[in-house]
Image: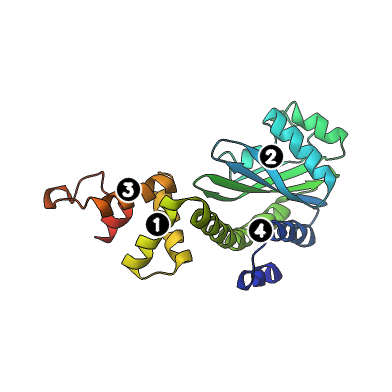
């Protein structure tokens, strides 16, 4: 994780960092033989952008197909999901036996982060029954916290890059926040992301509110109106 974090000082390759996190999980969490990352977008689409073995892609595809399994649970509101024996786990009756046939007996899914429009989970696999005891789970969760810190920073910067090149609205709103609060571009975008999460609105909607308020400033009687852009209202 330390080596991966150093890449933040240079050009960032998110896919490579995801791969490094998976490899680090195998090296640092006892019993883990394979690892992968699941990403879920705001529409519920699931994908595996990084994995340590082709087998991970096969079992993940089954989880996505049946909407069952620890990795699905981890990105659908559960912090951690674990199975000591997928062959007989009643929580995932379709997925479990099929995963066992492919050689996966134990599995654990841990949520890495949950941002507006994007959720990430770390998936750990073993061919042995009962591979993950309580100590292993604790180690895996501590590892996930460190991975979240590193990955969250990178994803924010990647989202900034995407937003500035593909969304004029978000790009202009980021500029407004930079000027008003004297922030750098990445810090301004981080602030937009945080406020959008707190107020449960998409970053696109928040950006539109900020630009609308800039174009049509509220009158003194409207200052406390609930339609005011949350970011600028809080700053006021």
Q: Is residue 57 left or right of residue 177?
A: right
Name the residue beneath numbered marker 1: 172
Of 88 and 36, the residue lying toward us: 36
Q: How many marks?
A: 4
Name the residue beneath numbered marker 2: 70
Q: From the image, which quarter does the C terminus lie in?
A: bottom left
Residue 92, x across and y down, in percent:
71, 30
Give the CA distance from mark 3 to mark 2. 38 Å
Task: Tell which tag, 2 or 4, sits nearer the viewer.
Answer: 4
Q: Earlier in the sequence, mark 3 or mark 1?
A: 1
Name the residue beneath numbered marker 4: 14
Q: Secondary structure at mark 3?
A: helix
Give the CA distance from mark 3 to mark 1. 12 Å
Would you place residue 150 above or below residue 213 in this image?
below
Name the residue beneath numbered marker 3: 209
In the orientation shown, which residue stands out farthest toward the left? 221
Task: Tell which tag, 3 or 2, sits nearer the viewer.
Answer: 3
Point 79% across, 62% down: residue: 27
Of 77 and 220, the residue lying toward us: 220
Point 44% across, 52% down: residue: 168
Residues packed near mark 1 inside 10 Å, few (<14), some (14 to 19) or many (20 plus): some
Q: Secondary structure at mark 4?
A: helix
Q: Earlier in the sequence, mark 4 or mark 3?
A: 4
Asked whether residue 89 is in view, the answer is: yes
Give the CA distance from mark 2 to mark 4. 24 Å
Task: Tell which tag, 4 or 3, sits nearer the viewer.
Answer: 3
Q: Earlier in the sequence, mark 3 or mark 2?
A: 2
Q: Earlier in the sequence, mark 2 or mark 4?
A: 4
Give the CA distance from mark 2 to mark 1. 40 Å
Residues packed near mark 2 inside 10 Å, few (<14), some (14 to 19) or many (20 plus): many
């Amino acid at each position: 994780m330390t080596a991966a974090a150093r890449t933040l000082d240079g050009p960032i390759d998110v896919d490579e960092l995801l791969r490094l996190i998976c490899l680090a999980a195998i090296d640092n969490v006892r019993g883990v033989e394979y690892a992968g990352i699941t990403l879920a977008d705001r529409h519920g689409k699931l994908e595996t952008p990084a994995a340590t073995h082709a087998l991970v892609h096969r079992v993940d595809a089954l989880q996505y197909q049946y909407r069952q399994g620890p990795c699905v649970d981890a990105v659908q509101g559960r912090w951690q999901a674990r199975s000591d024996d997928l062959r007989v786990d009643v929580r995932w009756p379709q997925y479990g036996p099929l995963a066992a046939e492919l050689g996966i007996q134990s599995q654990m899914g841990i949520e890495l982060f949950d941002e507006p429009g994007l959720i990430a989970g770390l998936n750990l696999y073993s061919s042995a029954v009962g591979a993950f005891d309580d100590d292993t789970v604790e180690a895996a969760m501590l590892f996930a916290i460190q991975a979240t810190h590193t990955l969250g920073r990178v994803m924010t910067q990647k989202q900034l890059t995407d937003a500035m090149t593909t969304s004029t609205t978000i790009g202009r709103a980021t500029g407004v926040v930079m000027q008003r609060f004297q922030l750098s571009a990445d810090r301004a975008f981080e602030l937009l992301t945080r406020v959008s999460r707190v107020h449960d609105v998409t970053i696109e909607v928040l950006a539109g509110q900020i630009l609308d308020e800039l174009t049509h400033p509220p009158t003194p009687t409207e200052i406390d109106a609930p339609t005011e852009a949350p970011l600028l209202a809080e700053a006021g």
